[in-house]
Image: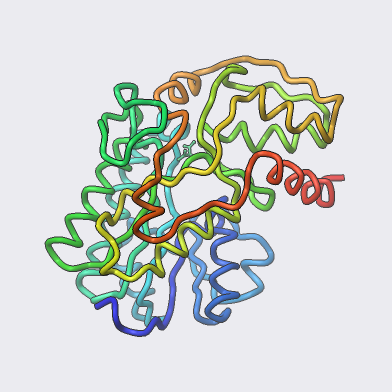
Amino acid sequence: MSDRPMKRILVTGTAGQIGSELVMMLRDMYGNDNVVAGINRSPPSDKVRDSGPLEVININNKRDLYDLVDKYDIDTIYNMAAILSAVGEKKPMLAWDVNMNGFHNILECAREKELVRVLNPSSIAAFGPETPRDNTPQETVLKPRTMYGVTKVAGELLGDYYFRRFGVDVRGLRYPGIISSETLPGGGTTDYAVAIYYEAIQNKKYECFVKEDTILPMMYMPDALKALIDLAKAPLEDLVHHCDFNVGSMSFSVKELADAIRVHIPELEVTYEPDFRQEIADSWPMSIDDTAAREEWGWSPSHDITSMTKDMIEKLSKTLL
Ligand code: AKB
């Protein structure tokens, strides 16, 4: 199946943080008309709306999904539609429905219509408090305590099952917190690492919902996009893993992030009011062993906290000030 030349791509969740930038990068690579942007409840950015085909798609509606795939002769789906960790704790049934039932519809569609490939991101949320937190191994304890994490582990297993049982080429990686300047993240635990830049630039102060010594793995958006696209392009025969690649980039505490921002904005004041998201953050890894991704498809990130912070502040200062 995977040897067929690519024809058309559907990206779901293109109003979201990663989807909105992924769709633009794929349009640059494969041509605007060959990449369909799928949105559901939230409106797309002007760039996404104006640069190529746009469709409303609820992945929980199987009929609509199948019709859309037929209409555009889609052969590859990047499923970026998901309910993240913090919203998932407020609405666990919705998280299950979108992240599991929606994903299952995509897998069934890929199986029945013999699509070339499905990409479905997983997350560090697949891990839990019993997982080793330092240099978290590829193969380790997967006992998350959030509904988002439960759906991510189950999604990894289901994707691997579809590969082994039906030959559907499903791939995924465990994203850390993603930091970006185009679209705000919605409803995650790692959202503070983006919000702090916006608040630093606009108000020079930020109230953080996790403690200052909270350390989590993070990644800058250009690396996050590169990771997914490089994984999508990897020869199938090189892959030992499929839906569960660890990918690391950088790890820092909130204090270290604030200090990096203070190099550019010395007046930044940060206060701390931990809420329910602290417990989620404390159950996730602090750093990631991504040897499998490096060996199987050449993963190598480009950004560190210093280069990311310089770029974030330059970009956001242009749009916010
Ligand atoms: C979240 O915080 O829920 C996400 C994630 C780490 O998957 N950013």
Percent of width and height locating residue 185: 58, 43
> Which corner quadrant holds the N terminus?
bottom left
Report the residue that reaches farthest toward the left: 165
Q: Which of the 4 image quadrants contains residue 154?
A: top left
Residue 151 versus residue 109 in the image, above or below: above
Residue 194 versus residue 122 in the image, above or below: above
Residue 242 versus residue 178 in the image, above or below: below
Percent of width and height locating residue 59: 36, 59
- Exactly how many numbered labels are in the figure? 0
Residue 58 versus residue 87 in the image, above or below: below
Q: Residue at x 69, y 21 (%)?
A: 207
Percent of width and height locating residue 80: 45, 55
Q: In screen coordinates, is 66 left or right of 266?
A: left
> Which corner quadrant holds the C terminus?
top right
Q: Residue at x 83, y 46 (%)?
A: 317
Q: In screen coordinates, is 206 left or right of 202?
A: left
* 270 and 290: which is toward the camera: 290
Q: Residue at x 56, y 81 (%)?
A: 31
Q: In screen coordinates, is 68 left or right of 306?
A: left
Q: Which of the 4 image quadrants contains residue 197?
A: top right
Percent of width and height locating residue 310: 76, 44
Q: Residue at x 65, y 38 (%)?
A: 194
